[in-house]
Image (spheres, grey):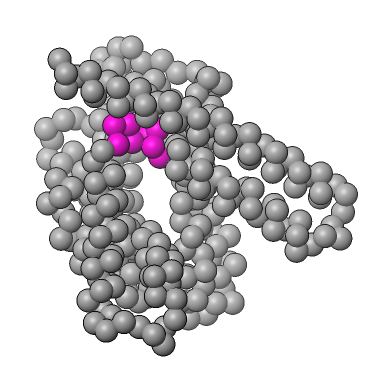
Amino acid sequence: WVMICLPLFFLVTWIKDMKYLAYSSVVGELTLGFGLIYIYIYAIVHYAKDEITERFPQNEWSWALFSSFPQFFGTAVYAFEGIGLMIPMLNSMKFPERFRMVLDTTYIFCGFLFCVFGLTIYMFYGTSLQDASTITVILTQGSWLTYTVQINLCIALLCSYPVQMYPVNQIVEAYIWPEEKEMPKYWDLKRNALRALIVFLTSVLAIMIPDFSSFMSLIGSLGCASLAFTFPAIFYWKLAPSTTTLMKIILTLIIIFSIIAIVVSSYLSVVNLIHGLENITSTIQT
């Protein structure tokens, strides 16, 4: 299915201007919002009818599972995946002076959404979702509404993928062709070919991953955690060396905590990925 969608991914990643990608992002957010709202209402209705216990008889939940905290850390910090879009978005805004207000509002809204949706679904379904590859597993299978939600989530992925790849493409293209004045002949053709190659490589990687949740935790630990905690603390210390002693202590604690969490979470994610590969290999051999 991924390979069938490749031509669509090629087309959307060939869009040059960030402002046109904004329209694609809006469509993706609307379709994703529809899916989340339906799943949320579905869970509440079935919980009220006491149908969750019948479908998931082994359902349990607890206030905290410290054994899975490292993987939770990587998965939760993955929410900062869009941090690489900050500068491109700022440069593309018509009123850049409003960027701080937009950023703060977005953080508050997304934080509230993540907490309410995650806690509610976990309280209803608990450990039944532990081994689920997607949240849609809780929906009634075979229903046209379930198919509609799945299609909407696919559309959201299609529309948000080019936005996420925009800074990646900029960095890779700037590395290969550093001087804009020295653009190679057939620039558009070569650039689109490079972007198509990146799309193909990421698609192959997605197909090969046996445990996507562990892979997402690994990416969150290695990339997002350092961008969200470690580097900002280091940069702040460097840019404001005359800060107070209390602030230096706080920055030190943030750096130490982030480094320990990155190492532990990354290690456990790699171990889970290796176990997943071993299980696939043993299944193929049998």
Q: Residue 87: image x %, image y %?
A: 52, 69
- In this rendering, the answer to whether 183 lies above or below 220 is below
Query: Looking at the picture, how far across and down is residue 13, in whole percent?
Result: 27, 66
169 and 62: which one is in front? 169
* Magenta stretch in the rendered image: 209-216
Given residues 264 and 82, the one toward you in this image is 264
Residue 100 seen by the camera: yes
Q: Residue furthest top?
A: 58
Residue at x 39% of width, y 70% of height:
176
Q: Give the percent coordinates (x, y) of residue 95.
A: 52, 80
Name which residue lies at 40% across and 26% down.
Answer: 272
Q: Is residue 157 left or right of residue 228?
A: left
Q: Is residue 26 above or below residue 211?
A: below
Q: Main secondary structure of the magenta part?
A: helix
Q: Quadrant of the C terminus?
A: top left
Q: Is residue 125 visible?
A: no
The image quadrant of residue 243 is bottom right
